[in-house]
Amino acid sequence: MAEVVGPRIYSCYNCRNHVCLHDDIISKAFQVKHFTWSCFLFSHAMNIVVGPKEDRQLMTGLHTVADIYCGDCREVLGWKYERAYEETQKYKEGKFIFEKSKITKENW
């Protein structure tokens, strides 16, 4: 009998709440200027809370972003791109950044 394998999932490092799927990764190559850790860009997220929108000057220009929090423990996990002001950055709108250090692999 074959082993049933589900989707590869990332969970909140703090409480193991499922927050995103490996299949939804757009890029693993995001580096954040003001932080020493790397980030992943995802097309979708789940079981999160989106905070208030604010404008932030990021490496790639001015963006409207909202912090994202674990839906269970409320740990800040990254942010959602709400608006990109630079035309070359529009592809990020509606996407999610998860800090690599804030998520852990489940079901791999």
Image (cartoon, grey):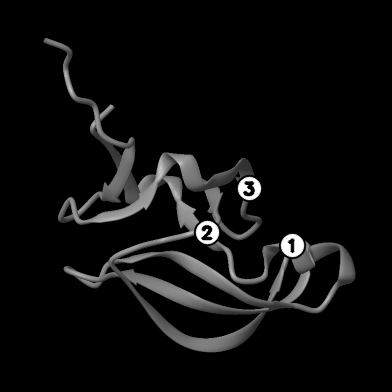
Viewer-proximal residue among 98 and 31: 98
Residue with the mark numbered 3: 31
Indicate which disc, 1 or 2, sits on the residue closer to the N terminus: 1
Q: Residue at x 25, y 49 (%)?
A: 13
Residue at x 54% of width, y 88% of height: 53
Chain-order first, disc 1 or disc 3: 3
Kindly check if marks 1 and 2 are in contact, taking CB atoms under 8 A apart as contact.
Answer: no
Residue 64: x and y, percent?
65, 82
Provide the secondary structure element on which disc 2 rests.
strand
Q: Quadrant of residue 7?
A: top left
Separation of marks 3 and 2 at Cα, in angstroms? 11 Å
Q: Give the secondary structure at mark 1.
A: helix
Is 88 above or below relative to 30? below
Of residues 6 and 40, the one nearer the viewer is 6
Frontmost of labels 3 and 2 is 2
> What residue is pinned by disc 1?
91
Which labelled disc corresponds to residue 97? 2
Lateral position of residue 37 relative to residue 2, left or right = right
Quarter containing the N terminus: top left
Quarter of the image for residue 108 reads top left
